[in-house]
Image: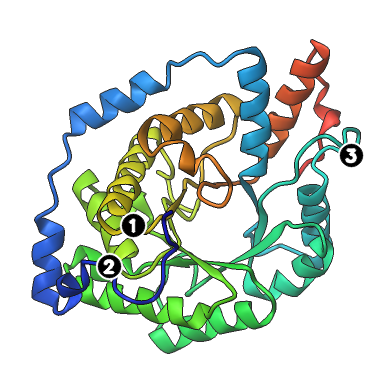
Amino acid sequence: MPTTASAAPAPGLADVTASDSTLRRFLHGLPGVDTVGLEARAASLGTRSIKTTAKAYALDLAISMVDLTTLEGADTPGKVRALGAKAVRPDPTDRTSPATAAVCVYPDMVPVAKETVAGSGVKVASVATAFPAGRASLAVKLADVREAVAAGADEVDMVIDRGAFLAGNYLKVYDEIVAVKEACGTSARLKVIFETGELSTYDNIRRASWLGMLAGADFIKTSTGKVAVNATPSNTLLMLEAVRDFRAQTGVQVGVKPAGGIRTAKDAIKFLVLVKETAGEDWLDNHWFRFGASSLLNDLLMQRQKLATGRYSGPDYVTVD
């Protein structure tokens, strides 16, 4: 059975993080990404047709994988309570609808979210480390994490220092992830956000994936949802290949979370096909795969209703987030 990540170096790979030079040598020694092949495979898998009972299963699975998210400056306790209630019971007219995996909020809203979902099994995730830019000192970032965990966050979504990564200062990024993982303690799982839209190349996304996993990430996550390019089938496929290969080498299983830009049930099902065909069925569970989204849940619910009744519901069938 695969183990989960820890703050300790990955089994069998401790030497590669011994110094900046050894880490750089390892990351730049990873196989280069075949851009044409990667995008062609992602496009091909996206053409799979999922019908009837398989579609019903996929819709419920996708709902159970949603991190229902609100990360706006105008967030209020009332909005977070409404979001938490929707996460617990996405469709009040149908008790067979699964709950979402989590609600994701800013650290100051964690107590409100925690109270709202109490006893439901829905997790509370909090962004941290000066989200979304990550431009703060390590002390400030760790204080951000500790505040969220102390308030009851079950999961922490951190952003890496993209400036340091793009400058080739990989050990600094690694050390920050390790420190954040330690600040999470034993009570909160850590999702590491790369902001793939700012990493420029697929090779950089592969390097960031391995760097995050080496440092103890429980999940690797594409994006903040705050830039022009967020989750795509191609960058998610690349990250799924990374977690698959990492487990094969170390025995440690790491989750994947595409976030931003996934708005329709059709898109979500395409991502589930990527998971099954790339990482395998072990990842088809919300402990190992999540969607970071806000509007996606509404379309999943409407498609679920369509499958059950044979007709599309009106726009007032779902709540407006």
Check disc 2 and give the amino acid type: Pro
Regarding mark 2 in the picture, which secondary structure is present there? loop
Regarding mark 1 in the picture, which secondary structure is present there? loop
Check disc 3 and give the amino acid type: Pro
Residue at the (39%, 82%) spot, across then down: 179
Query: Does 159 appear above or below 306?
Result: below
Query: Which image quadrant for residue 3?
Result: bottom left
Pointer 1 with pointer 2, Cβ within 8 A? yes
Which of the two discs, 1 and 3, labels the residue nearer the N terminus? Answer: 3
> What residue sits right under mark 2 in the picture?
11
Query: Which image quadrant for residue 167?
Result: bottom left
Distance between the alpha carbons at the discs numbered 1 and 3: 41 Å
Query: Does 175 appear above or below 166?
Result: below
Q: Is residue 309 visible?
A: yes
The reply, left or right, for residue 35 in relation to residue 10 is left
Regarding mark 3 in the picture, which secondary structure is present there? loop
Q: Is residue 169 visible?
A: no
